[in-house]
Amino acid sequence: MMDVVKLLTILILLVIYSASKKSKVDAQMTVQELELAQHLIFEDISNIKRKLWIDLSSKLATLETKLEHMENNRMCNVNGNNDLRSSDKLSQDNRQNTTMATILLRSFHDEKLKLRKLNKLLQKLLTDNEELSKRFGDHDEYLTDLRAHMSIMDEFKDKDEQFNENIQQTVTDLMKSHEDLSRDVTILNDTLFVKSGENKHNVRKPVFVSEWILIRSQDPSLGERAIPHGLGEIPYKVDVQIRPTSGPNAGWIFSGDSAMQADDDLKDEVYGGVVYFYDSSNVYIMAPMIGNNFDFGRVLNTGATKNRRLGNNHQTSNEAYVRVKIWSPADFPKPDIESEWFPLDTDNSSLAYYELTHGLNEYPGFVNIQIRCTSINGDSELISEGIGSSASNRAYLNSGGVIHAFDKNKIRVWASHFHESEKYKAYNILGGFDGWNRGLLKGINANRGQFRVLVWNRLKFVDSSQNSNFEQIEENVNFPEWSPFDKFSPQTDLLSFYAQANDGLNKGFRFPGYGNSQSTGPSSFGGVMYAYNSNGDIRIWRPNPLVDGYMIHVYEPYGNGNNHQRSNNASFVSTLLRTN
Ligand SMILES: *[C@@H]1O[C@H](CO)[C@@H](O)[C@H](O)[C@H]1NC(C)=O
Ligand SMILES: *[C@@H]1O[C@H](CO)[C@@H](O)[C@H](O)[C@H]1NC(C)=O
Ligand SMILES: *[C@@H]1O[C@H](CO)[C@@H](O)[C@H](O)[C@H]1NC(C)=O
Ligand SMILES: *[C@@H]1O[C@H](CO)[C@@H](O)[C@H](O)[C@H]1NC(C)=O
């Protein structure tokens, strides 16, 4: 119950703050108090999350399994006898337990929803707080509220002893408190909310969405597909979604990555994913396929091998469904920046690193980097998109990909560059094809190419009515599951996930996450892997620091050594574009 008391404290402090501003009494001091209270609130939210997602989650998982088991038994009994009386076989005891467990589970799920709402309300409140200093009106009203809060607080104190007696009681209490709180927050919000007149949507639904298509690793015929999109021009954004056919992540969606960063050289080293490239006619998707060594490539791999990635629900699968979403230039507003095509050359150190200024003075709503490679004879081209990390490094490793990250003013682009000191050239722009289906892409020269940058400022990208819920930031990166958003449509909306560096040379820069784990072999590796579902939940598999894993990882050969970094001091950021 202390959590709730602290949460109420901030409301009270807000009230005091506005009152003191009004009467010009030592406003500076109050701001500090306010900041302190805000800090406490975020701590509390973290604690509640920990309770829900770590302390309780194993109990709940057990509960869920038991329930499933009981349900199965019940079904067996019913089916076996085709006789309702068979349910008598279940003891009274058992049925009571099942009912209680069901109620508990439901409360828990409700609780997660409430927590998410509360989180959002608080974010909103803190944003509105800026408005507060300009817009507060009659402070008598606030004082009345204050008195009301005080009495609610006393009520809570009385209940303090019962609190924590058992899970169910905790859940019920929290739910009630959340209701009280959201009522209070709503009152404040009503006073503070500034209506924005604009309500036009800015990004349309994707012009092309494919069916779910079966793809299979280690299968020459189901391992690569060309999916015609019929645009006749290069899309602005391609989103490749991977849906497991079964397993602990059934119902979750993983993303395609646009580079090959692993090969088939090492025994027992599972690597994974679906990679994609495209041109003005097709999207090409490719699964792992043995080349000359081992067949450990999978279409889905969360990085359990050698404990490389931390997280729950680890899974490797040979089979999944893939869906392609395409936004044409006409579906997006005009970009704030659509750069020219700049040259990249892995043989030329001065063409391996770029720092461009977008100058928006805030995080863009969306950034896409497109990389173009052409065939030797020049009659075909292939587009890939930027990635957010170098996976791993090893002699002979056929690896590639162009890394990029952005902050409030800049975009950094790192291509791999061959060091004279290295024995073997192991990098290029797209990655090598050893260990991947490749028939569709033969003949492309991936040693050099060009890239361009597309940038949209946030208000251009997002419907202004969604702006406050567009972006979520989580500083506590130790949770394997995060619930930043409400329900959305994975078929038409666009969810993005980043690790934002909190220290070092790239402090403040956002690096896109991975859809799969491609790291193999004994070397440092990086990038945060994620999946999402339509409820707006995100599962996270982050690199294990104990085996040289880093959330931020730009290995030295990339960008000719410019701003290379290994760090685990990062926050998670996710944005959700809801198209209308
Ligand atoms: C039901 O709960 C009671 C008390 O917690 C316990 O003793 C009993 O074993 C449970 N029954 C089943 C079938 O789990
Ligand atoms: C704040 O008030 C506005 C206007 O009444 C409403 O649209 C919005 O949903 C409210 N926000 C919250 C967080 O309650
Ligand atoms: C590398 O690129 C730079 C800039 O385009 C160019 O001036 C230089 O001649 C290139 N070096 C080589 C060895 O191609
Ligand atoms: C992360 O970096 C920031 C900035 O250098 C520092 O203040 C903070 O203590 C670091 N956090 C951790 C967990 O190392």
Image (spheres, rainbow, N blue to C red):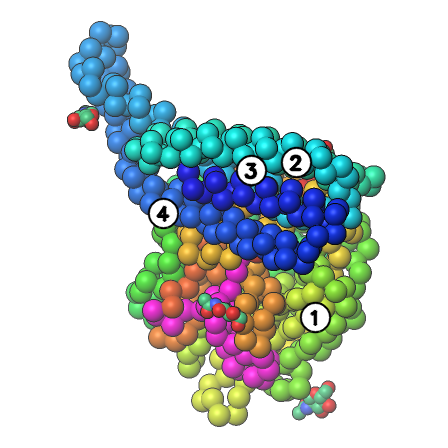
> Closer to us: mark 3 or mark 2?
2
Residue 485 can be seen, yes or no:
no
Q: Is residue 445 above or below residue 335?
A: below
Q: Nearer the viewer, residue 383 or 16?
A: 16
In the displayed structure, does residue 84 sit left or right of residue 363?
A: left
In the rendered image, which residue does mark 3 sit on? 117
The mark closer to the camera, 1 or 2, is: 2
- How far, Cα to Cα, is label 1 from label 4? 37 Å
Cα–Cα gap, marks 1 and 2: 46 Å
* Crowdedness near tag 2: few (<14), some (14–19) or many (≥20) residues, C-alpha within 10 Å: some
What residue is pinned by disc 4?
A: 54
Looking at the rendered structure, the secondary structure element under dot 3 is helix
Q: Amino acid at mark 2?
A: Leu
Residue tagged 2? 143
> Mark 1 touching mark 4, by CB under 8 A?
no
Height in image: 517 above or below 416? above
Give the labeled residue for mark 1. 410
Q: CA distance from mark 4 to mark 3?
A: 19 Å
Position in image of residue 296 (x %, y %): 36, 61
Above or below 453: residue 36: above
**Element type at mark 2:** helix
Q: Earlier in the sequence, mark 4 or mark 2?
A: 4
Q: Nearer the viewer, residue 391 or 281?
A: 391
Side of 428 relative to 193 (left or right): left
- Residue type at mark 4 is Ile
